[in-house]
Amino acid sequence: MASIALLPQLKFEFDFEQFFPEGDEDLAFYKDFIQDFETDNNFLLVGVENESGVFEQSFLSKLQKSTTDLRDIPQVKNSQSITSIRLPFKTPFGFTSFPLVHVSEPDRYASDREKILNDKRFVGNLINDKGTAAVILLKTIDTLPVTESDLFIAKVDSTMRVNGLSDYHLLGRGFFQSEIVKIQKTEVLICGIISFLAVMIIMWLIYRKVSIIFITLTSVTVSLIVFFGFLSVTNRGLSLMSALYPVIILIAGTSDIIHILNKYLFELRHGKERITAISNTMKEVGLSTFITSATTAVGFLALMTSRLRPVREFGFNCAIGVMITFIIAVPLTMALLSYFDEHKISQDKRSTKFWDNFIQKLYLFTKNNTKSISWGTILITVFCFIGMSKISTNYSIQKNLPLNAKVGVDFLFFEKQFSGFRPLEFAVLPQGNYKAGDYEVVKAINDLESHLESYGVIGSIMSQASLYKSLVMSSNENNAEAYTFPEDEESYNVFLPLVKQILKSESAILVNADNTKTRISSRISDIGADSIKMISGKLDGWIDANIDSSVVKIKQTGTGLILDKNSQYVKENLINGLGLSLLLISLMMAFLVKSWRMAIVAFVPNFIPILFAASLLGWLGIDLEAGISIVFGVVFGIVVDDTIHFLGRYKILIEQKHSVEEALHITITETGRALIFTTIILFTAFLVMVFSSQPLTRTVGTLISVTFISALASDILLIPVLIRWLYPEHKKD
């Protein structure tokens, strides 16, 4: 009851900082960088479209009113659109300004349109190249918290609707946080309900007993409630992969219950009394069930090696959840079983006969096709290594967004119409006696800025050099062709006082307080992490070759660079984590069966499903990224369960003086059915994640489901072959 009372206190969280790879030197540099400047993701873009064109008075009036009203939202520091900008203009008496768009003078719209669409400062930033869509750029408070995002987005929505612009698109930190958390809440509920229904149907098809369904669902439901109660009382939030929690708890509990149930029914069919059957079940299956829960937890704890906090927390939470499920579900199942008579839980004879015949044929297949199974394993392993060689880490934001939801639709709108979302920042560090505003420093910035434009995928470039080019342009009657950097230092110094005044009013957006650092701010299209990394390498090479390092040093930084570095670490963390878990679980198996040979038997069939899962990434063209790496922790943590149940039963039979072949026959007969049943449950429970709106969740669910089939085949077919090879006749190590 206490856990139920805590459920409303569960918190959902999502913020970009969670996905920064901790301990990275570039992250440390970025944190130091933003001490002098604002962050590069403190914005919200509000995009509005008008098919007949932006330059209609009614539309521009609504845009102007919305731009002004949005400034009144507490989380907004400033708002800007083409209707709020005033261009500087040089007169004989100095600089003055005039509006970029003359909203109240329709007869000037044609000239305003031509001027704006020929000005690279605005196209792709505040207006698209066709002149059919405009953007209101909102500068928000730094590191907008999740708790304020919903309120912030609600106020933006209200403002836009009041001003008659209800059909709008959003892009930015606050919107992502608000939408992703909403999706998390929905998917935890939906995936949980669908998984429960799937388990009910499968359990009914297998056992045809309402009592068994009641026992199973009662045990796993109580376990799930206690688990969520634990998360609530320890203040551990639900994050991006939270939809997996109900599924993992469900299948962990159901797997334990099926093994217990099959052994208990086996004892009853052989004439044992209920108390004796329960006692024998706990003796022979209880230890194996505990070991499977422990090894599953170890598999999840392998994710603790990740540099990403959400992945580490997911691994830890799942490990705790699995152990909670064991502690709750196993005793509760045994207690509930004791209340039911045998006829209320036993399968009908036709069903039992079908499975007995099927398992017998399976045993004979492993016995008579040893060479075929061995060669098949070798060929599959080669297939896996070829697939693994094709793995890419060129993931993009677009691929991980629910494209049918507003957050996905809006992201695509900005990618197609404007300069995209991914920040691309450069820290500019003057050397020696040079200061951020010196001609040589700003000229180097301009050289790099011109080079950035040549890539075609980099836009929204803003720097000190941009200010000077704008002023040169304003001195030439705002002719777009005059958007050039001052030709020499003398010309540069003419604009220096005005630039200093502008920079002072912008409060360290481009230059820090003591004039020792400056920045270049831009955005790059969502072309994929590896593609961006390639461009990044080219930029570093160009900077080394073309920028005088005695004058200035330029270093790439920003949230985009930091997040993309995850692709460099995910393989490293995956290999280290799986290597550690393989070692620990092999040692646990060696301790359990007291045999180094049996440790090899346990290792090989569990290593192949991991290879298979990895090869699917390559063969199916799925990019390896932080979320996908969770697959391997889940797969390895769960598939080892069947191996432990198989070898645990085999060990008991060997200790009872059965021959190797007799022990294999009995083990396959007794545990084979449970392995098949649990795999059906695992496959179905994870496959329901295809109903998720998030591509990442769907991909994870599909990969895990398919991999479980390979794990079952590996256990049922390969373990007997390995045992016969290593133990031609049973003998102790």
Image: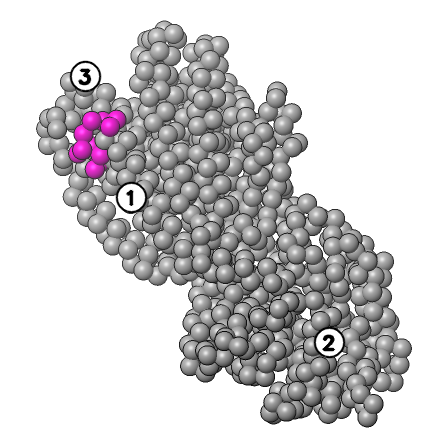
The residue lying toward the viewer, choosing from 647 and 394, is 394
Q: Secondary structure under badge 3?
A: loop
Indicate which disc, 3 or 1, sits on the residue closer to the N terminus. Answer: 1
Please tell me the numbered disc located at residue 607.
1
User: For mark 3, what is the residue?
Assistant: 656
From the image, tell me which residue sits under label 2.
501
Any magenta on residue 596? yes
Question: CA gap, disc 1 to disc 2?
Answer: 65 Å
Residue at 82% in and 93% down? 92
| Mark linked to residue 164 | none
Name which of mark 3 and mark 2 comes first in the sequence: 2
Q: CA distance from mark 3 to mark 1?
A: 30 Å
SS class, disc 1: helix
Q: Dot 1: few (<14), some (14–19), or many (≥20) neighbours within 10 Å? A: some
Residue depicted at x 38% and y 12%:
278
The answer to whether 6 appears left or right of 624 in the picture is right
Horizontal side, residue 89 vs residue 370: left or right: right
Q: Residue at point 77% right, 81% down?
A: 87
- Amino acid at circle 2: Gln
Q: CA distance from mark 3 to mark 2?
A: 90 Å
Q: Amino acid at mark 1?
A: Phe
> The disc labelled 3 sits on which kind of residue?
Gln
Range covered by the magenta-colored residues: 591-601
Viewer-proximal residue among 383 and 59: 59
Residue 543 is left or right of residue 436, and the answer is left
